[in-house]
Image (cartoon, helix red, strand yellow):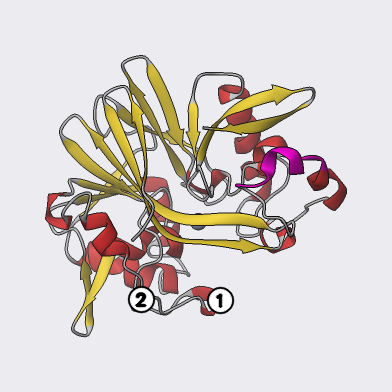
């Protein structure tokens, strides 16, 4: 049984449903990590975001957002029963049972993928017989138009990320293309955070004077908020990704905005506090 975490942001409830948490060497994620500089951040990274061995810890989870009578699943992890990049699959986890303890799959109104990488579109579908079919039959699957246009019909549209988690949704006609500032409800809107992928979006929540933002992969690990120029290997447009992280930190640093990380381990959330010429995530 998974360990749920919930947040209340005004009238909006967010629940984390975990698929997997794992440590990895910093250089396996961060392209230009500086080991000495990383050491300087250990005091606030440990124990949640870095383990005793100095490995960084990442999580793969979905976030269930309940707002204005609508249920939204933000990012759908890797999914079961399918090949995955880097020999990570096929998985057989209890993710769907864990999710359905929160919301039945027929009751999900929207699925929002921050971008179309394999670890964000997996449970868009599930295997029934020999086929992959949409897991959430009554949902609209929202894809940012720029993201969709980048991948679909392009040279990579046969890739593993899309074949299992995205194409069956398109075939079923359940997808809807939305602008990068789309409002899902009065309280939940998208914001454009390109660079990791060209049409990447984050999710902003505002309700009853409280504010939060779900990052997506514009940042993978909290140390990249302190060192925005530390890129992630999979960033498609590295310079744009750095610019997006810098903007994000200046927008949300020293504010009341709760940052909920799509790959942040442990508490998964915190507030950005500026410290000297750098900053840290104070876990909440
Ligand atoms: Zn990811």
- Farthest residue in the bottom direction? 130
Tell me the residue that label 2 is attached to: 92
Q: Residue at x 31, y 16 (%)?
A: 208
Report the span colored magenta: 40-48
Percent coordinates x, y for residue 84 in the rendering: 46, 75
Q: Which mark is residue 187?
A: none
Q: Is mark 1 within 8 Å of ligand 1?
A: no
- Farthest residue in the top direction? 209
Q: Residue at x 53, y 50 (%)?
A: 265
Disc nearest the viewer among 2 and 1: 2
Left or right: 131, with 2 as reference point: left
Give the quarter of the image for residue 79. Answer: bottom left
The answer to whether residue 47 is magenta is yes
Q: What's the distance in space between the residues labelled 2 and 1, CA to CA?
A: 16 Å
Q: Residue at x 69, y 50 (%)?
A: 231
Alpha-carbon neighbours of circle 2 within 10 Å: few (<14), some, or many (≥20)? few
User: Measured along the vertical axis of the image, is residue 182 above or below residue 172?
Assistant: above
User: Measured along the vertical axis of the image, is residue 275 above or below residue 55?
Assistant: above
Mark 2 and mark 1 lie on one chain; the one further toward the N terminus is: 1
Mark 1: secondary structure: helix
Would you say residue 159 is visible in this rendering? no
Give the quarter of the image for residue 144. Answer: top left
Percent coordinates x, y for residue 129 in the rendering: 18, 84
Q: Are marks 2 and 1 in contact (CB under 8 Å)?
A: no
The answer to whether residue 251 is magenta is no
Tell me the residue that label 1 is attached to: 86
Would you say residue 23 is visible in this rendering? yes
Percent coordinates x, y for residue 30 in the rendering: 70, 55
Mark 2: secondary structure: loop
Left or right: 116, with 43 as reference point: left
């Amino acid at each position: 049984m998974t360990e749920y975490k919930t947040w209340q942001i005004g009238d909006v409830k967010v629940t984390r449903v975990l698929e997997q948490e794992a440590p990895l060497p910093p250089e396996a994620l961060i392209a230009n990590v500086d080991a000495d500089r990383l050491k300087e951040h250990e005091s606030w990274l440990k124990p949640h975001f870095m383990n005793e061995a100095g490995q960084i810890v990442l999580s793969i989870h979905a976030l269930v957002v309940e707002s204005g009578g609508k249920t939204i699943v933000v990012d759908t992890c890797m999914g079961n029963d399918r090949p995955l990049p880097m020999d990570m699959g096929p998985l057989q986890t209890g993710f769907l049972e864990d999710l359905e303890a929160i919301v039945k799959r027929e009751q999900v109104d929207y699925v929002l993928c921050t971008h179309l990488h394999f670890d964000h579109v997996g449970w868009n579908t599930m295997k029934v017989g020999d086929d992959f079919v949409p897991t959430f039959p009554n949902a609209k699957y929202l894809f940012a138009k720029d993201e969709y246009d980048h991948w679909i019909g392009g040279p990579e549209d046969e890739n593993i990320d899309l074949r299992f988690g995205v194409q069956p949704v398109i075939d079923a006609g359940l997808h809807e293309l939305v602008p990068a500032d789309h409002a899902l409800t009065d309280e939940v809107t998208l914001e454009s955070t390109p660079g990791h992928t060209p049409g990447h979006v984050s999710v902003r929540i505002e309700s009853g004077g409280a504010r939060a933002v779900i990052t997506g992969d514009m940042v993978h690990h909290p140390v990249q908020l302190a060192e925005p120029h530390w890129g992630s290997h999979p960033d498609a447009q590295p310079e744009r990704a750095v610019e997006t992280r810098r903007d994000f930190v200046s927008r949300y640093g020293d504010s009341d905005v709760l940052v909920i990380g799509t790959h942040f381990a442990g508490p998964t959330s915190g507030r950005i506090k500026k410290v000297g010429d750098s900053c840290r995530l104070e876990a909440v």
